[in-house]
Image (tube, rainbow, N blue to C red):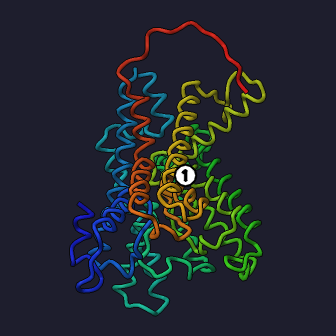
Amino acid sequence: MGAALLTLPVSHSEIGATATWGDAFFTAASAVTVTGLVVVDSGPTWSPFGELVILVLIQIGGLGIMTLAGFLGIVFTRRLGIRRRVLAGAEIGLTELGTLRTLIRDLVVFVAISEFVIALLLSIRFAIEGERGIVTSVYLGVFHSVSAFNNAGFSTLNGGLERYTGDWFMNLVVAAAFIVGGIGFPVVFELRRAWRRPREWSLHTKVTLATTAVLLLAGTLMLAAVEWNNADTIGGSSTVDKVLASFFQSATSRTAGFNTVPIGELRTPSLLIFLLLMVIGASSASTGGGIKTSTFALVIRATIAELRGDPEATVFSRRIPKNLERQALSLVIAALGAIGTSTFLLTWFDPDLPAIDLLFEAASAFGTVGVSTGLTGELSAPSRVVIIVLMFVGRVGPITFGTAVLLRPQQQRYGYATEGLIVG
């Protein structure tokens, strides 16, 4: 439906201009999966009506997935006994949300208030620049608010946010938008309820906040170290602006899609840092993609426990069930398999394009990040199909995987004889 609307003449910025069905479908897929990869520049290509279509698709994609994730969480807890239901509900932060109606209401109110505050702040910032009227400033504020909160990465500005590299207000507001949108509504609701009582936080909230903080800090330090003297990115900026730009890129790499430095000018080590962060992504039940922070933390902790010879993996003095370890490992393997297979196909269909850039493109699509080294528009038709499928899989894959695992009709009631094999 979005693609059909984007092919209409009223969706194009110039009278008589047309976008191909492939361009429209790619843009619609990128918007509804809140990815942000584009094959045509949004500002010069789409009219206000076309941008409105994209904005609605972003909102549906972000809010719809969050609602579905919450719905599955409630369905899961209701399939268990009362004792197990209470425990499971506490772990995913749904103890105060008794019904699906209450969940959806609180979720919509939370999203609406968040986007309103962000839009207000951005509108004021755009208006202060003095280059635009009030209506245009408000429109830009609303568009970038929805895009940022839903981790979509779409921008109607020429060059995106690259002109705001050293603008602390713009950087922090936009970063706060996609960090809050990507942290997951169960965590936000639990913080709202018990933000002064960290000891009462669920394990999920503790792991999510700790992992997010570590990734933000580590990403900032590594990107700053690699790009410090790169004149094409942050080398010519002041020390504080270098730190700001590194922080923003570290935050945006985990599914936001905005960038304040040209991604195509990053050094190869920085691209590899981006790759890791894009695969990890945001947190569970959020507007972001990737394997999720809790999955990454669980796999790392399970690996450490295995290397140490510990009988069980523990996090914050809590034992992790073996079935969760298997689920996390399965999700990681599936993600790497999807990215690897897609990269193989991309290098096959477009052998003249750099392999590292194609790998970057695949990871960005799977993580629904949206950052690109600048070759999205150069992809052939088959490669664009691969990216579309990858964006879709990256957006709904984890939820589909969780549904298959958590909502199985029955457990297997038989087993086979045990036999070992050589590992490593």
Instruction: Classify the position of the C terminus by image quarter.
Output: top right
Question: Quick check: can you spot residue 180?
Answer: no
Q: Give the quarter of the image for residue 386.
A: bottom left
- Depth check, front residue: 25 or 256: 25
Q: Residue 128 versus residue 131: which sits nearer the camera?
A: 131
The residue at 54%/54% (across/down) is: 363
Image point 43% across, 35% down: which residue?
Answer: 402
Horizontal placement of 385 versus 245: left or right?
Answer: left
> How far across and how far down the image is residue 102, in percent?
32, 44
Query: Which of the pair 412/68 is nearer the observer?
Result: 412
Query: Which residue lies most toward the bottom here?
Result: 130
What residue did someone put label 1 on? 281
| Helix, strand or loop for disc 1 | loop
The quadrant holding residue 410 is: top left
| Residue 171, x across and y down, in percent | 57, 73
Q: How many marks?
A: 1
Relative height, residue 320 to residue 290 (above, below):
above
Q: Position of residue 237 (x, y in %)?
A: 71, 81
Q: Position of residue 131 (x, y in %)?
A: 45, 92
Q: Is residue 102 above or below residue 25?
A: above
Q: Residue placed at 38% from the left, 72% from the top? A: 143
Left or right: where 29 falls relative to 229? left
Q: Where is 340 relative to 238, above or below?
A: above
Quadrant of the rendering where the N terminus is positioned: bottom left
Residue 368 in view of the camera: yes
Q: Residue extending furthest top?
A: 417
| Mark 1, other Cα within 10 Å: few <14 / some 14–19 / many ≥20 | many
Decide: is 215 above or below 314: below
Residue shown at 38% from the left, 82% from the top: 44
Amino acid type, mark 1 = Gly
Q: Is residue 411 left or right of residue 170?
A: left
Is residue 265 rendered to the left or right of residue 183?
right
